[in-house]
Image (cartoon, rainbow, N blue to C red):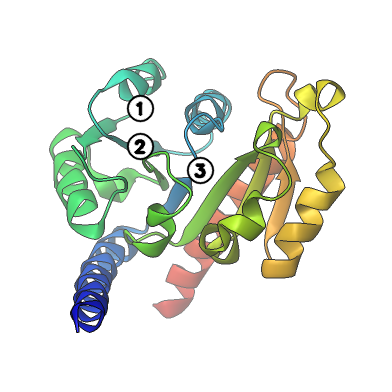
Amino acid sequence: MHQTIDAALGINLLHANQEGADHNRTHFDEWGVTCFNVMSSPGAGKTVLLEKTLAALRDQLRLAVIEGDMTTELDANRLRAYDVPVVAINTGRSCHLDAKMVAGGIHQLELCTNPRELDLVLVENVGNLVCPAEFEVGEHAKVALLSVTEGEDKPLKYPVMFQAADCLLVTKIDLLPYLNVDIEQIQQNVRQLNPHATIIPVSAQTGIGLTEWFEWVHQQVTQRCQAIVGSH
């Protein structure tokens, strides 16, 4: 009986969250803004990837960040150094951002910039391999990161995020010479779950793969712009 009630509550929570995510996406669409939901376990390299992205693309695209963290603004402050709008959301005990939290972030963003002048909003989710993938926030694409230090088995042990990802960045590949890890096996395990995801091995330290990542970002923003123009 309790299991049935818990399952029903879970379904209702996800349904309510999906309605909120759809509402957020409507805002982004009306403004002509693309939104990415950037997800990974703690320490996989989300913030440093965003630092590299802001540094490389802030003169080419109009960028903003909604930064999720459980208790601090440490990562948000790192990103503010790149002179783009950054809104920090503290989730408290929650292990993920949800649509309602991001809606609050969107309204804060409206106070510091005109969202119609933006091209891309990057939502950095809380570090967790499970919950963030189950709660949409209004994104147009999901970006997952997996560090080579996490091993080959993580896509199979935590499949939801990797099944949902539009782009997977395999990070910290400069450490491969020091690890007993097969990057080809990582990619095969991801392909087993999600044959259509774009997979890009990267190193924020050496710059390997970052150009390909930047090109993917540009491609997604251009496609969204074309879709919006076509809809009118």
Kindly identify which residue carries mark 3. 40
Mark 3 lies on a secondary structure that is: loop
Rendering coords of residue 202 (x, y %): 72, 34
Rendering coords of residue 71 (x, y %): 22, 28
- Residue 159 appearing in the image: yes
Q: Answer left or right for 187 relative to 166.
A: right
Q: Earlier in the sequence, mark 1 or mark 3?
A: 3
Mark 2 lies on a secondary structure that is: strand
Which disc number belongs to residue 65? 2
Instruction: Please state, as top left, top right, bottom left or bottom right, where the C terminus lies in the image.
Output: bottom left
Q: Nearest to the eye among marks 2 and 3: give it.
A: 3
Q: Disc 2, disc 1: CB below 8 Å?
A: yes
Q: Earlier in the sequence, mark 2 or mark 3?
A: 3
Q: Amino acid at mark 2?
A: Val
Marks 2 and 3, how far apart in space? 16 Å
Q: Amino acid at mark 3?
A: Ser
Instruction: Please state, as top left, top right, bottom left or bottom right, where the N terminus lies in the image.
Output: bottom left
Which disc number belongs to residue 84? 1
Residue 231 in which image quadrant: bottom left
Q: Disc 2, disc 3: CB below 8 Å?
A: no
Mark 1 lies on a secondary structure that is: loop
Q: Answer left or right for 148 relative to 22.
A: right
